[in-house]
Amino acid sequence: MPPDGLSIKSPPSEQPLLLWLVKVLAPMKRTRVKQMLQHGRVLVNGAITTRHDHLVLPEDTISQMPEGSLPPVEFLAQAGGKIAKPPFTIIHSDEHLLVIDKPSGLLSVANGPHKTNTIFAKLLEWLDIQKAGRPHVVHRLDRETSGLMIFARSHQVAESLQTNWETVRKTYLAICEGCPRPPEGVVDNLIEEGRDLKVRVVERPGPDARRAVSTYKVVSRHQAYSLVEVGLETGRKHQIRVHLAHLGCPVTGDELYGALQNPCGRIALHSWKIQFPHPVTGEALEFEAPMPDGLKKMLTK
């Protein structure tokens, strides 16, 4: 449901919505009123209405979404045009946070020369167009990993999520080479990033060694590949990729950690489910992002 809006006076007789809004919202400019409609900020009887010629009646209830709010995800998914449509799928939005479905191939945030072609930059630009504030980074996904990402809409909410990150339950889907043995278990070891930026399992504690814990379960087998569900108990860099490689079953397409094949032109890792208490209301939230078609096709062969 759309958020509660600011009440707008109803017309004394039947009138086209745009003409009535221009009249009742004066001195607001006609262009601004059109933008409100295009962005899905006008509700008639509780439903988002974008048509200029929609006829409103004296008994209709008209309202305007507050400045800085975003339309519900159902509207965003169907929105057309450059302004209204987000750059990627918005799974959830409220005044405190956004949950998006990140496509593979984009960095989460700027890294060296890559400043604009990132998830953060694209989301920042879109929110700016909507006059809906700016995103705040909570966590990251590797460039080739797809799926769920959380962004806060204020520094305070970002800080709260990061402070309580251990309460966030994250589940991934990975297509790996071979099949882990046993087909279900826990990987609990120390990992360390080397000077070459590659992460390795280490036997002894050290100043840079970090404990990493993952649970895994084979969901299905597909000739040379297996679909594996992986849960993160800790959130270390490249943790899933290192742990599956440690089991002798690297993620398909992950040449850095020993994969021999790359049939879909990417690392076959997807952030599938995420569960956490809302940082402000405490409500239990759970979201899911479907596996991309390219990865699904691998499982039909």
Image (cartoon, rainbow, N blue to C red):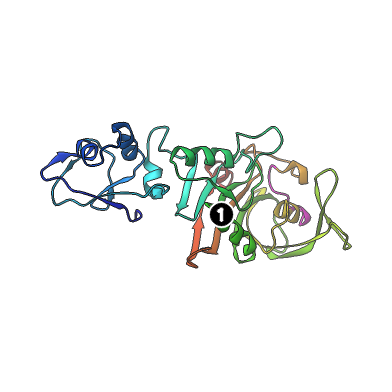
Looking at the picture, how far across and down is residue 123, in whole percent? Answer: 53, 41
Secondary structure of residue under mark 1: strand
Give the residue furthest to the left: 13
Q: In the displayed structure, would residue 92 be above or below residue 143?
A: below
Reading the image, the residue beneath label 1 is: 272
Task: Give residue 14's quadrant in the image.
Answer: top left
- How many residues crowd mark 1 within 10 Å: few (<14), some (14–19), many (20+)? many
Task: Left or right? Give the position of 101 relative to 245.
Answer: left
Front residue of 55 and 76: 55
Q: How many marks?
A: 1
Looking at the picture, how far across and down is residue 273, in whole percent? Answer: 55, 57
Say which residue appears at 52% left-offset and 47% top-offset. Answer: 101
Residue 170 visible in the shown view: no
Task: Left or right? Give the position of 278 relative to 237.
Answer: left
Task: Give residue 244's quadrant in the image.
Answer: bottom right
Residue 19 visible in the shown view: yes
Residue 4 lies in the magenta stretch? no
Front residue of 56 and 30: 30
Q: Main secondary structure of the magenta part?
A: loop
Give the residue furthest to the front: 27
Front residue of 20 and 143: 20
Say which residue appears at 80% left-offset and 45% top-offset. Answer: 197
Looking at the picture, how far across and down is residue 193, in whole percent? Answer: 81, 51
Q: In the rendered view of the protein, which quadrant contains the C terminus?
A: top right
Q: In the rendered view of the protein, which quadrant contains the N terminus?
A: bottom left
Say which residue appears at 41% left-offset and 48% top-offset. Answer: 70
Kind of residue sitting beneath label 1: Trp
Q: Which residues lie in the magenta part?
A: 245-253
Task: Left or right? Give the position of 159 relative to 55.
Answer: right
Looking at the picture, how far across and down is residue 274, in whole percent? Answer: 55, 59
